Image: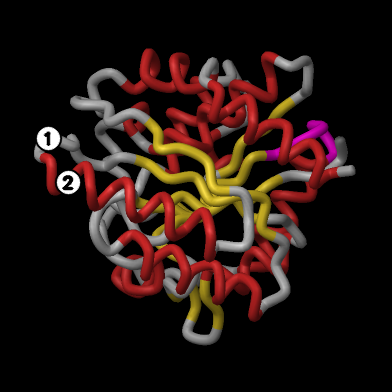
């Protein structure tokens, strides 16, 4: 493998980090040299750097790259990247992200890149996350919700990627909340069934709901990396590289 993959989502908080971390770990367990990257991250607390998404990605693969290489653009304010950058009077340069990615891609057989928010989240006044994916020339893995509203968000995201001619590896459906009622189970079942017919890409999941993920990130990722869903996803990622 000489390519990477870009993990994006239908929204914020859908599980991009846990999927990206599990995918990187699963690829590493299959004997590949794997790097990780979170080009832009907002809501980073300087007093708790180990709790950032970039640090968690690095920790899961026992990486040695500097956090500045994994995340060239960290911001403190938990808002959209463009607003966070403007609040700190900084400018996100997609060319810098591409250059850092290229450096990592020369070190590793595969680089798992995690996005920020959804594909239309602006990173500069004239470019959004989908433009960044195009610049990196990567295929995308989309993480979406199984809950009500997941169909619309997933189909809109897939359509946005196709408009930019970005190859789509798979749609991974994640439980972001517990499924406790009979109605919730019906909603989830119908979401999965409809997306399976209309997405036009492999639909994987649903992933198990993980309560207290912030406190149990490592064991949750380790468990997911061993799952049948991640075995299937790693196969699809490797096939996309070929």
**Residues at marks 1 and 2 touching, judged by CB atoms closer than 8 Å:** yes
Query: Regarding mark 1 in the picture, which secondary structure is present there?
Result: loop
29 left or right of 230 in image = right
From the top left corner, tell me how far across and down residue 235 is, in percent: 73, 32
Location of the N terminus (image quadrant): top right
Check disc 2 and report the residue beneath it.
184
Q: Which quadrant of the view contains residue 82?
A: bottom left
Q: Which quadrant of the view contains residue 32?
A: top right
Check disc 1 and report the residue beneath it.
180
Q: Which mark is residue 171?
A: none
Which residue occupies the foreground of this view, 190 or 8? 190
Please report the residue visible at 54 percent of the width from the left and 15 percent of the height from the top: 226
From the top left corner, tell me how far across and down residue 184 is, in percent: 17, 46
Between the residue at mark 1 and the residue at mark 2, the CA separation in whole angstroms equals 7 Å
- The magenta segment is 106-111
Which residue is situated farthest in the left direction here?
181
10 Å crowding of disc 1: few (<14), some (14-19), many (20+):
few
52 left or right of 170 in image = left
Visual colour scheme: secondary structure
Above or below, 89 against 54 in this view is below
Which residue occupies the foreground of this view, 226 or 50? 226
Please report the residue visible at 55 percent of the width from the left and 76 percent of the height from the top: 160
Q: Does residue 72 appear anywhere in the picture?
A: no
């Amino acid at each position: 493998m000489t390519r990477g993959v870009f993990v994006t989502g239908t929204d914020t908080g859908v599980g991009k980090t846990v999927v990206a971390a599990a995918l990187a770990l699963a690829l590493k367990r299959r004997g590949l040299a794997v790097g990780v990257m979170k080009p832009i991250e907002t809501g980073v607390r300087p007093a708790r750097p180990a709790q950032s998404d970039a640090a968690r990605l690095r920790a899961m693969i026992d990486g040695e790259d500097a956090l500045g290489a994994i995340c060239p653009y960290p911001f403190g304010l938990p808002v959209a990247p463009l607003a966070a950058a403007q609040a700190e009077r900084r400018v996100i340069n997609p060319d810098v992200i591409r250059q850092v990615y290229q450096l990592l891609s020369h070190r590793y057989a595969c680089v798992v890149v995690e996005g920020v928010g959804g594909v239309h989240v602006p990173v500069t006044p004239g470019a959004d996350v989908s433009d960044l994916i195009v610049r990196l020339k990567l295929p995308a893995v989309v993480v979406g919700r199984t809950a009500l509203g997941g169909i619309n968000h997933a189909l809109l995201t897939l359509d946005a990627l196709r408009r930019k001619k970005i190859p789509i590896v798979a749609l991974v459906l994640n439980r972001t909340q517990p499924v406790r009622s009979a109605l919730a189970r019906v909603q989830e079942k119908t979401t999965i069934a409809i997306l399976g017919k209309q997405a036009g890409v492999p639909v994987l999941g649903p992933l198990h709901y993980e309560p207290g993920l912030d406190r149990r990130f490592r064991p949750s990722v380790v468990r997911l990396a061993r799952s049948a869903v991640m075995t299937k996803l790693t196969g699809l990622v490797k096939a996309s590289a070929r």
